[in-house]
Image: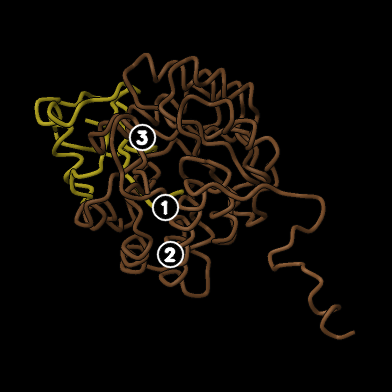
Chain colours: A brown, B yellow
Amino acid sequence: MDNLVLAGVELPSRLILGTGKYASGEQLKQAVAASGAAVVTMAIKRVDTEGHRDDIVGPLRELGVRLMPNTSGARDAREAVFAARLSREALGTDWIKVEVHPGQKYLLPDPIATYEASRELVRDGFKVFAYCGADPELCRALEEVGVAAVMPLGSPIGSARGLETRGMLSIIIEQSHVPVVVDAGIGAPSEAAAALEMGAAALMVNTAVAAAGDPVAMARAFCLAAEAGRTAYEAGLASRAATARATSPMERFLEEAMK
Amino acid sequence: MRIVCNGKAREVADGLTLGALVDSLGQGREGVAAAVNSAIVRRADWDATALRDGDEVEVFSMVAGG
């Protein structure tokens, strides 16, 4: 299986794991290990000066995974750029997942703000991973401003509705010159495998693992699905046909023999 | 002097540095970023950044997220 290359970095897994919604830091750590993910996402938040903070950076660094901060919570391009610059200071990485979703109900990415923030951050030297709608022309525009990868959604964040945008995703994959990371909405390992079978470079999941009955076991299932999906893509799927194509010999020997 | 830290006013010693303020929050410095009056201050400069009366300080940390 070919290795994934994101922003010039070769990675041993095609799965990117979100770190949200786990019951504990320990469970998160185990899930990350079981998933085989080499990249995990994180968010940045104003410190609650009266609360305590669970340090998740330390444990994740111990696992040796690459940390990809996101701009979640940003409602416009200016906030996303500020969040990206804060994250760069906090983690010492120029990788940033740009996400701007002003509407709380569906958390759909604002295409204009995503484009503007991505353009500014690329100019500022960031390796931008743009979470965006499954719009081939938007992905093309993001590619033109120099993003490291596009991250079109399968369905709304956390919805577990799967690859509702499948048709558009396949156009994006066909046309893109940067890695396509299918992000958001993947609910089952079969959907993860399907995205990679289509030729997506990678995929990102969070809720499907974190909200599973057994998150660590589900992380392992996604690991296997990612491997299966990519291996299948590289093997080349058989073409579809409208009618049956026999897999056993169709000689009329039975008819002859039973005369 | 009086500063505002993450939206809350607080009385602090004159000349308090940004580094000392961050340390007082008990968050450590790993995965933490700070801005004074909306300008991000690099961690390497925190200890040399003396806060001034009326400064608005924002301290951020990395948290779980997707």
Horizontal side of residue A35 vs A73, given as left or right = left
Determine which quarter of the picture holds residue B10.
top left
Do marks 3 and 1 share a subunit?
Answer: yes
Mark count? 3
Q: Secondary structure at mark 2?
A: helix
In the rendering, which numbered label is found on residue A219? 2
Whole-angstrom CA distance, mark 3 to mark 1, is 15 Å
Residue matched to label 1: A17
Horizontal side of residue B58 vs A80, given as left or right = left
Residue closest to the eye, B45 or A178:
A178
Residue matched to label 3: A6
Whole-angstrom CA distance, mark 3 to mark 2, is 21 Å
Which x, y percent locates residue A98?
A: 46, 31
Residue depicted at x 84% and y 78%: A256
In front: label 3 or label 1: 3
Lower sequence index among marks 3 and 1: 3
Which x, y percent locates residue A91?
A: 25, 38
Residue depicted at x 46% and y 44%: A202
Residue depicted at x 41% and y 67%: A220
Lower sequence index among marks 2 and 1: 1
Residue depicted at x 58% and y 25%: A175
Which x, y percent locates residue A51?
A: 34, 56
Which kind of residue does numbered mark 3 sit on?
Leu
Residue closest to the eye, A69 or A129:
A129
Whole-angstrom CA distance, mark 2 to mark 1, is 9 Å
Determine which quarter of the picture holds residue A22.
bottom left
